[in-house]
Image (cartoon, grey):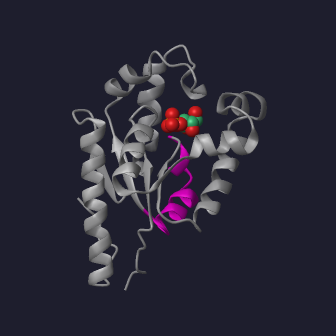
Amino acid sequence: MPPKRQYRNIALVGFMGVGKSTVGQILATNLGFEFLDTDRVIESHTGRRIADIFAQDGEPAFRALESSLATQLEARSGLVISTGGGFVVNPANLESLRRHCLVVCLWASPGVIHERVRHQSHRPLLQTQDPQAKIAELLEKRRPAYQESDILVGVDFRGASETARQVANSFRRLQSESEGSGSAGSRVP
Ligand code: S3P
């Protein structure tokens, strides 16, 4: 029998600009959970902005900070965790989240993502000549990792409040199923 899943927390994963932080804050309020954004935690631990960590130490150094945070989060409860867009690209981080979270991917198409991020300049990976091509390329590369999530919610035509409500409903249902029948681990189509 597969090991019993524990849903002490919810992790929102997915590409830059899909609304993880906005949805996460609404969801945390709805559930009475604490909201935590992995980028903000890294910034407060290091006292530096993500863009500066990328520029001065390089992306691998940032990924190491994400992995270390993933391990620290395993001991926590009652959290809605909004993860940076590349957090689950490292399979060990995804495995780590799956030990204590319902992992929910917010999915948007490349055109919608581009529309949402094109006037923002704080994301180092999108500071290129052709951000639209970069989005398409990275999204395709990351798709398999995002698809490992327990739930995928399309957000192209769904606002943040509706998305949060849907995730909260799925979370409550799965939590009560896992408490009741002892058969946690089901994946939601
Ligand atoms: C990244 C996404 C960013 C941030 C960093 C790298 C990525 O977070 O972690 O710039 O690799 O997709 P958001 O998804 O919150 O923009």
Q: Residue 11, position in %: x, y? A: 45, 54
Quarter of the rendering containing residue 8: bottom left
**Residue at left 43%, top 81%?**
3
Asked if one can make out residue 148 in the rendered structure from this viewpoint, the answer is no
Q: How many marks?
A: 0
**Residue at left 57%, top 46%?**
38
Tell me if residue 75 comes above or below residue 156 in the rendering.
Answer: below
**Residue at left 53%, top 42%?**
84
Q: Residue 174, position in %: x, y? A: 29, 69
Q: Residue 132, position in %: x, y? A: 43, 20
In magenta segment, residue 147: no
**Residue at left 60%, top 57%?**
70
Q: Nearer the viewer, residue 110 or 34?
A: 34
Quarter of the rendering containing residue 124: top right
Q: Nearer the viewer, residue 166 or 54?
A: 166
Asked if one can make out residue 56 in the rendered structure from this viewpoint, the answer is yes
Q: Main SS of the magenta segment? A: helix
Tell me if residue 132 comes above or below residue 19 in the rendering.
Answer: above
Q: Nearer the viewer, residue 116 or 134?
A: 116
In magenta segment, residue 91: yes
The stretch of residues the image draws in magenta is 85-101
Tell me if residue 131 comes above or below residue 168 in the rendering.
Answer: above
Q: Quadrant of ligand 1?
A: top right
Q: Quadrant of the C terminus?
A: bottom left
Tell me if residue 129 comes above or below residue 15 in the rendering.
Answer: above
